[in-house]
Amino acid sequence: MTVKRKPYILLCIIAVLAALLGIPRLFSMDYYLHIFVMSEIYAVLALSLSLLVGFTGQVSMGHAAFYGMGAYASAILSLRLGLSFWVTFWMAGLLVGTVAYLIGRLVLRLRGHVLAITTAFFCVLVTVVMNNWIPVTNGPMGITGVPSPSPFSLFGVHAVIETRAQYYYLGLLFVACVVYFLWRIESSRIGDAMIAVRENEELAKSIGIDTMKSKVLAFTISGALAGLAGAFYAHYIHFISPVTFTINESINILVMVIFGGMSTLFGPILGAVCLTILPEFLRMAGELRLVIYGIALIVFIIWMPMGIWGTIQRILLPKGPEKTQG
Amino acid sequence: MSMLRSENVSMYFGGLKAVENVSLEVREGEILSLIGPNGAGKTTFFNLASGFLTPTKGHVYFSDKEVTGLPPHVIASMGLVRTFQKTNIFAEVSVEESVRIGFNLHRRASLGSILTGGRATRDEDGRIAGVLEELLAFTGLADWRKALVKNIPYGKQRMLSIAIALATGPKLLMLDEPATGLNPVETKELIDIILRIRGDRGITILLIEHNMRLVVSISDRMAVLSYGEKLAEGKPDEISRNPAVIEAYLGKGFQNVSQG
């Protein structure tokens, strides 16, 4: 069965890759390309959150806080210290990862709704700091003039990241790296321990899994990746302000994860791309745009509780693990 | 040599004395059953030994190291693994994956090796796959490997709990009412498995069980708890003749009946 399907899957992968690489040629308008770059950023955000929500079963409504911290960290470092994006990008990830670790140690003792609400408050708190710590963040006015990545030469290839198409390719590389990273983590002993935490914490503890460690690790990785996405965003838009990183954004990312399908790698990507494109597509509906968007979400979630990817999987693989043997 | 030893362990929940001054020793290689009427404190004793509760008073030693108040995952990593009275499973994953999670304790591949898919990880995965296969066959779950745990029959779920516990490679396995809800055929299979866990794998077993036929047929020794206190300890035939035990189970005035 699987042997027969393999070349077919390989063909699909090649087709998707070609389509992804060809997008800037097909949609050369800046407006379209912008939507695709934003889809990439949201894909990273949704993927990173799915490690926490889908794999480890801990609901966080504070993801935008880490996203925002990454954006501010990278913007401030590059403007104040004159460091290149290629340095501040990683510094932002490291910094936000550290913050996520510390916050995780504090809040992951909580569970379920209480954890969701606490992380939501954390997100509000971070927005308040962005608005009021004027000497550093410039308050509600935001930070302007965040530079593009500096040109670089690698293996004799000289590259500039200036146009939207170039950002698109850089973003594609970013998403690919994140997918690979999460794929390796999720299929390893670390991912096994996270699944155990999600499924049954008591049983996980009884077989020697340090559940707190798993949760904190998921929270840290998730936060660090959101921080990297934030850094990418800041140097792409060149302007950041607190309104981008509110609790609404946290919920938006969470909806992408649920909409796409939680505990897979493709689900969150699909959710991110759909929910970035859909609101733009609905612009033609004018005032009814948000109403239609809301109804569409409700309908999808009622009809596809496993998310889009979960539903596709069920249709494509009728003999999947859903059915029992024997 | 003692595998597990408790010294005057007590657990109070407010004014309730769930376990009071229990001193018990599980010897290496034996099957010791803990019996007693409902509410006697058997499961509380399990929780105290496995770290899910910290005793109000007293000490617990595992392989002569004090484990009183250590977190459950640390005690489990030392080799004391317990199952639960209620069915405790990883519902949404496959049987195979469930048991693989049980091996987590023994997987040490570094982050670098995991990310690169390096040799250490591949070797480890291969080794685990082999042991996993053997364990699925041992517990009779091989035919169910791909099924989601929530979809397999109740008896198989109970067996899976034992398979997961065995995957951790315990020195002492503590089974909390493993035969509850099993039909006679499954109970026979369970007895067989428990005897082989001890016989083939040399794992010491502490067992809570209400099914007296099962208990008497496999135990080397038995201990009786009643109202949180230890009433008696000894060989199965001694226990079944002990007047205090009969009183605890049946009430006063039944001694003559059972002796007759």
Image (tube, rainbow, N blue to C red):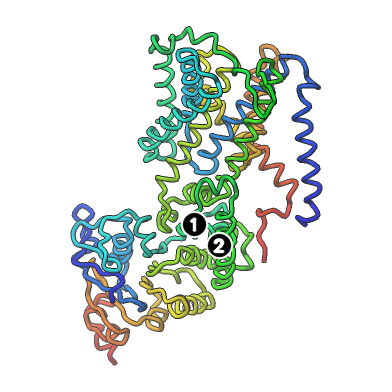
Residue found at the very far bottom of the displayed protein: B260
Observer-nearest of A198 and B204: B204
Q: Amino acid at mark 1?
A: Arg
The residue at the far top in this view is: A141
Counting from the top left corner in percent of width and height, residue B7 is at 20, 67
State the image coordinates of residue B49 (x, y, percent, origin top left).
Answer: 30, 63
* Residue under label 1: B107
Question: Could you tell whether A211 is left or right of B148 in the image?
Answer: left
> Do discs 1 and 2 share a chain?
yes
Q: Is residue B107 left or right of residue A288?
A: left
Task: Report the residue at 18% width, 66% height from top.
Answer: B8
In the picture, residue B123 is in which quadrant?
bottom right
Q: CA distance from mark 1 to mark 2?
A: 9 Å
Residue at 78% over, 39% down: A14
Relative to B184, residue A134 above or below: above
Position of residue B92 relative to residue A257, above or below, is below
Q: Badge 2 sits on which subunit? A: B
- In percent of the image, x 59 and y 31: which residue is there? A44
